[in-house]
Amino acid sequence: MNQTIEISPATAFGLTEENVLLVDLREDEDIAQASFDVRNLMLVPYSQFEERYREIPSDRPVILACNIGERSLMATYFLKNHGYEHAVNLQSGIFGWAENGLPIKGELKKKKGGCCCCSDGASQDGSNRTSCC
């Protein structure tokens, strides 16, 4: 897991079954709709990530996840640059997880597309930019 920066949903699920920690970086309103159904789950909203990243254990493997994998990829690089050797990103986020039939609680209501903060493809300011990050 040292050299890899991204892993597939199936690989991530297998690792969570082996007690690897999954860190969900989505915001509270996203988590209220649907969440990962795994044993070792930590919630750190991306909006609080830089203030709270030290809560994430640096001495064990961790998988970072968001809606579609963009924000969690940025967070993975951030952690790698701060000494987290065993941090990896979940490719395609919770949408890819669900598309692979992996366990979630609730129902994903937003459609895949755009970036993690605007999964419907519209930016937060209402414009139709392809990405709001």
Image: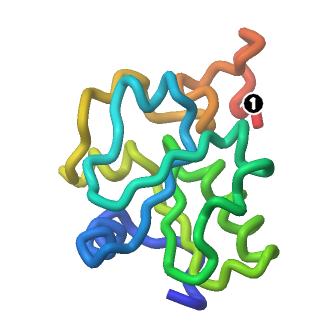
**The residue tagged with tag 1: helix, strand or loop?**
loop
Whether 48 is drawn above or below 62: the answer is above
Mark 1, Cα crowd under 10 Å, few <14 / some 14-19 / many 20+, is some
Q: Residue at 62% of width from left, 37% of height from top?
A: 115
Residue 75's x, y, as percent?
A: 69, 58
Q: Quadrant of residue 27?
A: top right
Extreme front residue here?
A: 55
Residue 81's x, y, as percent?
A: 81, 75
In this picture, residue 68 sits left or right of residue 96: right
What colouring does the structure picture have? rainbow
Q: Residue at 71% of width from left, 62% of height from top?
A: 54
In this picture, residue 50 sits left or right of residue 97: right
> Is residue 59 or residue 106 the one in the foreground?
59
Residue beneath disc 1: 132
Residue 116's x, y, as percent?
A: 59, 38
In this picture, residue 42 sits left or right of residue 55: left
Q: Residue at 63% of width from left, 77% of height from top?
A: 58
Whether 17 is drawn above or below 131: the answer is below
Q: Amino acid at mark 1?
A: Cys
Whether 66 is drawn above or below 20: the answer is above
Number of numbered callouts drawn: 1
Q: Residue at 59% of width from left, 25% of height from top?
A: 121
In this picture, residue 24 sits left or right of residue 108: right
Residue 83's x, y, as percent?
A: 75, 81
